[in-house]
């Protein structure tokens, strides 16, 4: 191998190593981004309502905001073309969407006068399924030292399922059912030079708005069902 060929090979190898080592977002970093938004501990909030109770079997004793893991990492080397793909998956503490949903549901239920539909009765809700997970993905392509990447945050498509039970003023069950809401979260492609922290923050902002929208949709459906 000539000196010139060796030099080109060294530069190419360095370039590849630089991308594979600096592009990947570690589990610790992703968890740190989530913690910076929600705090170190997530407490379950109780809504102030005398006719609505919201519980969830998803709730655990853990107060950690999120758990992340590197799920995949692939390097596909060819002669002049290399593709590098990695993914860091993040699962939020269920208390985060439960709190968001409960607050939005209670507020909107009062606005819509849902208690009037109950005629002095009570409503019990159970959040059985809710969107919790998303992943940070980096799909990088290298061709003759020219590289391009598609970097995006991808939701895990998980519908929300809510069981409800209505009881009359005498405590006797009068109606029950299940509400299913499709997951409105969508892929977020990062902008040029947008940091992972900023992209994650924007994704979570939209995620929270979607949870609130699902809460309002649940109220609207109950207004018809009860």
Image: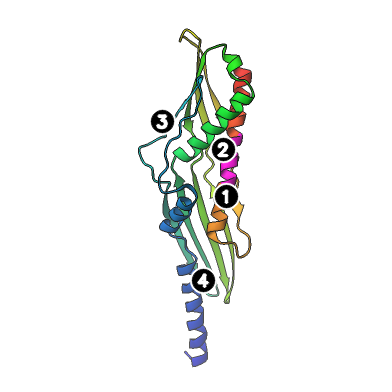
Q: What's the CA distance linking mark 3 and mark 4?
A: 48 Å
* Marking on residue 190: none
Q: What's the CA distance linking mark 2 and mark 4?
A: 44 Å
Q: Position of residue 172 (x, y in %)?
A: 46, 9
Which residues, given as a range, are shown in magenta? 205-213
Q: Nearer the viewer, mark 3 or mark 4?
A: 3
Q: Nearer the viewer, residue 185 or 11?
A: 185
* Marking on residue 211: 2
Q: Nearer the viewer, residue 19 or 145?
A: 19
Q: Nearer the viewer, residue 17 or 47?
A: 47
* Marking on residue 203: 1
Q: Position of residue 149 (x, y in %)?
A: 58, 64
> Could you tell which of marks 2 and 4 lies nearer the N-terminus?
4
Helix, strand or loop at mark 3: loop
- Residue 30 position (above or below residue 221): below
Residue found at x 52% / y 19%: 177
* Marking on residue 78: 4
Q: Residues within 10 Å of mark 4 (few under 14, many from 20)?
A: few
């Amino acid at each position: 191998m000539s000196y010139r060929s060796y030099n080109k090979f060294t530069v190419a190898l360095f370039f590849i190593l630089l991308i594979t080592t600096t592009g990947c977002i570690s589990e610790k970093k992703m968890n740190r981004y989530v913690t910076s938004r929600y705090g170190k501990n997530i407490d379950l909030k109780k809504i102030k309502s005398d006719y609505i109770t919201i519980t969830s079997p998803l709730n655990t004793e853990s107060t950690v905001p999120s758990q992340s893991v590197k799920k995949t990492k692939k390097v596909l080397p060819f002669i002049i073309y290399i593709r590098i793909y990695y993914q860091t998956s993040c699962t939020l503490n269920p208390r985060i969407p439960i709190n968001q949903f409960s607050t939005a549901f209670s507020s909107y239920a009062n606005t819509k006068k849902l208690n009037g539909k109950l005629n002095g009765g009570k409503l019990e809700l159970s959040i059985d399924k809710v969107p919790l997970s998303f992943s940070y993905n980096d799909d990088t392509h290298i061709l003759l030292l020219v590289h391009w990447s598609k970097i995006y945050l991808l939701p895990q498509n998980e519908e929300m399922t809510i069981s409800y039970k209505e009881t009359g003023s005498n405590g006797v069950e009068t109606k029950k059912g299940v509400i299913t809401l499709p997951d409105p979260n969508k892929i977020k492609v990062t902008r040029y030079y947008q940091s992972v922290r900023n992209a994650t923050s924007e994704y979570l902002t939209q995620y929270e708005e979607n949870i609130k929208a699902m809460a309002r949709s649940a109220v609207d459906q109950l207004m018809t069902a009860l």
